[in-house]
Amino acid sequence: MLKMRQADMPTSRRAFLKGAAVASATFVLGTFVPFGRFALAEGDAAAPKPVIDPNFFLRIDSDDTVTVLLKHLEMGQGVSTGLSTLVAEELDADWSKMRFDHGPNNPKVFNNLFFGSYIGTGGSTSMANSWTQMRQVGAAARAMFVAAAAKQWNVPAAEITVENSVLKHPSGKSARLGELVEAAMKEPVPQEIKLKEPKDWKYIGQKLPRLDTPGKTTGKAIFALDFRRPNMLVAMVARPPRFGGTAGKVDDAAARKIAGVVDVVQIPSGVAVLAKDTWAAMRGREALTIDWQLDKSEGRSSDEMLAEYRDLAGKPGLKADRRGDAAAALGNASDVHEAEFVFPFLAHAPMEPMNCVIELTKDGAEIWGGSQFQSIDDYAVSQVLGTTPDKIKIHTLLSGGSFGRRANAFADWAVEAAHIAKAIGGKAPVQLVWTREDDIKGGLYRPMVLHKLKAGLKDGRITGWQHAIVAKSILVGTPFEGMMVKDGVDATTVEGVAETPYQIENFAVDVHNAKTEVPVLWWRSVGHSHTAHVMETTMDELAGKAGQDPLAFRLSYLKEGAREAGVLKLAAEKAGWGKEMPAGTGQGIAMHHSFGSYVGMVAEVAAQEGGFKVSRIVAAVDVGIAINPDVIAAQVEGAIGFAMSAILRNRITFKDGVVEQGNFDDYEPTRMKEMPVVEVHLVTSAEPPSGIGEPGLPPLAPAIGNAIFAATGKRFRSLPFQGPISA
């Protein structure tokens, strides 16, 4: 098999073919699709077209194995199966021969087409931005193999068919893909590619088995935490107990006496202990005595922060959305509904905490890890090492979850590793390991958020809506500020409220950017993780005050034919909305649009002594064309399982500036016994595919909360749902 380092790749296909020679018996395809940058805000100009680069998108070996090089991180969401499906469909490959690997951090080829010239996985964009591109990769490869066979057999290319990796001609001639790799390498990449019609799809829309399952089941899959380099040292970092603190005087004498400890170095984020194994590094860290400088740190409790939020909410804020005159409309209302919603800080808590391996080279570094934003990680590391991003080679490995944690504008874990490697002069490869306590007590969090609103009713209709949101901005002060912050308004704070699909004539949204040293980051579904609950709970409450059915009330505020209405109706139909429920039980409905997708949910709950039990969730999902219905259903089920813990109990709280939670004993994941029966129904659609990694989360909390109210008359606005409940 041909193996080439990214830095060794020649600059033209002609030179590449000449240098690689065709003796390698491996077909290598580089291509591009002229997509522009994702329109993050209305009026954004498209980015320049990508350039052709002779890099890998797929490899086909002599044994017919087709390996798709992913430009997106596989972190459990099934992107490896989805991207490979698109290639296999147009290539007419045998699915049993499909494999995957992660591509290099070469932004000329592996960039996210919605992110412009950057490589990154996020915003549930993986399949949406790859939909045409990866099908073109497969179709181009197929055309090159067909052209090669036509020359060998001296027959018209149009007479050759391909099925399950076998090329055939009516004359009886046939060949496997693997037998033609040398000849196909000599063919030019076609400039015009015809893709299959939907009626001819064999794989798209089918429940193909996931490609990442066998390796994860057998233990052969290599995650970042599994990776080792010769003579590698393990590093663990002691970080300040409060955010904004720094290390002063350090006494490391006791740490250096621990067997296996090799070195102790101070870095910007704290003090790192390097050892021959993880246990020694952990014990060495515990033995450190550090004089922490906390005079500029966050020292408040959660309640003190919330008090400041409430004070801000009562003042005029930045204008996030304006329609009509909300204040005047509220003055004309016969009934004014007021509500407050509070959402706590939340940790991402992926099963595999932050980690990576770094090894310095003569002019840069190599990194092995679950990199989610390679173009940010290589840039940030290059700044630490005093080099350029092209000198940082990232080997992307499987990741045990993320939920947004591995994709941050600061590349905190990669930067820490770079500082440590630099501090020891690159004398050994370094594996940085965060414990779960490190990440829960000292990571980055979904912001704490306060919503306060007033909504007026008159004659059963909403007359006006005033809404204030207070939260620390995720994007202000980051490289993303220029794209997603306008006039001080962070789009991720107000998404799902501002520009709501509900046709409310008099609507005003203000936002306040709170200040705190606590670092914040997008968490699964980002702002939608709180805005959906506010909107859908309030719509339910207003429907009740207007004496109307919650479903009918919502539909009356949606445009005719809206996709939001489609998922509401389908979820209601499949759940038997409005059916008679036993005493102490109830149904609740909610919908939300996020990341280009539409999800409606009906929850069924039963009151129990001391709480409630969610027994059933019926979800209707519109993601456009469903590439793999089974992966879509799994993502919705996973989002429900992930979100249930935040609905039932989880929160990050502060006492004197110190995080009170630390591990899964007091930041407890959802248990199997708590999972409801989940049904996922797909809306048939011909629209291009959209995301599904995140959209399954937002409607869950309001659907459950509305069901609790239907069952008991108890209304939960803030999360988590805690307090007395009775049937």
Image (spheres, rainbow, N blue to C red):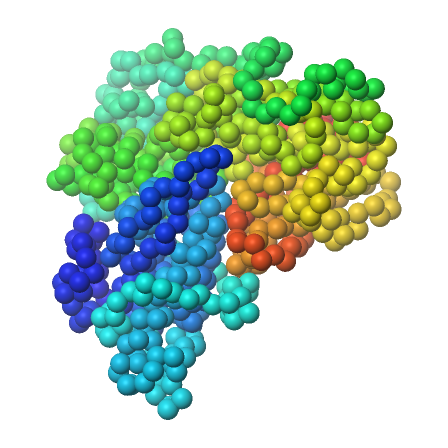
The correct choice, above or below, for 638 with respect to 444 in the image is: below
The correct choice, above or below, for 182 with respect to 702 in the image is: below
Instruction: Name the one closer to the observer, 627 or 384.
Output: 627
User: Which quarter shows the N terminus?
Assistant: bottom left
Q: Residue furthest top?
A: 295
Residue 708 visible within the image: no
Instruction: Name the one closer to the observer, 127 or 282.
Output: 127
Seen at 40% across and 58% down, the residue is: 134
User: Where is residue 205 drawn, in percent x and y?
Assistant: 55, 63
Q: Is residue 310 left or right of residue 159?
A: right
The correct choice, above or below, for 233 with respect to 1 in the image is: above
* Mark count: 0
The correct choice, above or below, for 672 with respect to 86 in the image is: above
User: Where is residue 430 drawn, in percent x and y?
Assistant: 24, 38
Seen at 86% across and 32% down, the residue is: 547
Instruction: Name the one closer to the observer, 459 or 414.
Output: 459
Q: Is residue 584 left or right of residue 645?
A: right
User: Where is residue 714 drawn, in percent x and y?
Assistant: 78, 29
Residue 513 visible within the image: yes
Q: Quadrant of residue 188?
A: bottom left
User: Which quarter shows the C terminus?
Assistant: top right
Q: Quadrant of residue 296?
A: top left
Seen at 53% across and 49% down, the residue is: 690
User: Where is residue 173 drawn, in percent x and y?
Assistant: 34, 88
Seen at 52% across and 34% down, the residue is: 526
Q: Is residue 497 left or right of residue 229?
A: right
